[in-house]
Image (tube, rainbow, N blue to C red):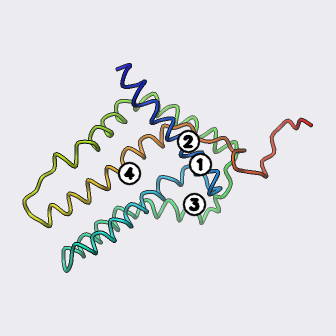
Amino acid sequence: MDWINRYIDQPLLHGAAGLLRSWHLRTRQPPELLEPTWNLVVLSFLLIASGQVMAGETFTLSVAALVMLALPSARKLLSAVKAGQGGYGAREYKSLRARAIAKREAEWSVRIIVLFASACLPFIARIDDPVGAYFMLGASIWFVLTGPLKAYLDAAEPPEPNEGDRMYSGVFHVG
């Protein structure tokens, strides 16, 4: 178990923390908006791909399934826009950090299971029906690209609020 923690889990947690930090630096958005944005990007890619491969009722069904998968992420992003959530300060940082520490300690096995499932799912799922095979391929791609990322982003150390925020003023000013 120590080997898995040292060589798989910890590097992925550090990578997720770096990804959150670079997201916050480049977009000036709160780090919790990275996951729904990535989910919508992956679903948009799958929508374009399904338009190239499917037609008729199967395409309509796949569009409906992709829209249903996109609704929670779109709702989260729209509620952030409506709330005017552009600020990421010390309060949000402390809240995200406490939640990440709790998830990091309590959900270690869940992250490993999700990682293992995302690695195996594309190879396990074989379907003879071509339409069913396309749906399963799309579901596998969606899960591989979003499942482990969500698990690791939730447990990663969030960036400090002054990273990427030039207007941030700390308690102490030196010089």
Q: How crowded is mark 1: few (under 14 residues within 10 Å), some or many (20 or more)?
A: some
Name the residue tied to disc 4: 146
Amino acid at circle 1: Ser
Disc 4 and disc 3 in contact, CB within 8 angstroms: no
* Residues at marks 1 and 4, CA–CA distance in whole angstroms: 18 Å
The amino acid pointed to by label 2 is: Gly
Above/below status of 12 relative to 130:
above
Between marks 1 and 4 in the image, the one whose residue lies nearer the viewer: 1
Question: Along the polypeptide, which appears first: circle 2 or circle 3?
Answer: 2
Name the quarter where the N terminus is drawn. top left
Q: Which residue lies furthest to the left in this view?
A: 128
Give coordinates of residue 133: x percent, y percent.
15, 60
Disc 1 and disc 2 in contact, CB within 8 angstroms: yes
Q: Mark 3 points at which residue?
A: 80
Q: Which residue is drawn at 83% across and 38% down?
A: 171
| In contact (CB < 8 Å): disc 3 and disc 1 | no
Furthest toward the top, the residue is 2
Secondary structure under the numbered disc 4 in the rendered image: helix
Please tell me whether residue 154 is drawn above or below residue 81 in the rendered image: above
Q: Residue 148: x and y, percent? A: 38, 44
Amino acid under disc 3: Ala
Q: How far apart are marks 3 and 1 (CA)?
A: 20 Å
Q: Residue under circle 2? A: 18
Alpha carbons under labels 2 and 3: distance apart: 23 Å
* Disc 4 from disc 3: Cα separation: 20 Å
Gap in angstroms between the C-alphas marked 1 and 2: 6 Å
- Residue at 37% from the left image edge and 36% from the top image edge: 111
Q: Nearer the viewer, residue 65 or 133?
A: 133
| Residue marked by disc 1 | 22
What amino acid is found at the position of numbered circle 4 in the picture?
A: Thr
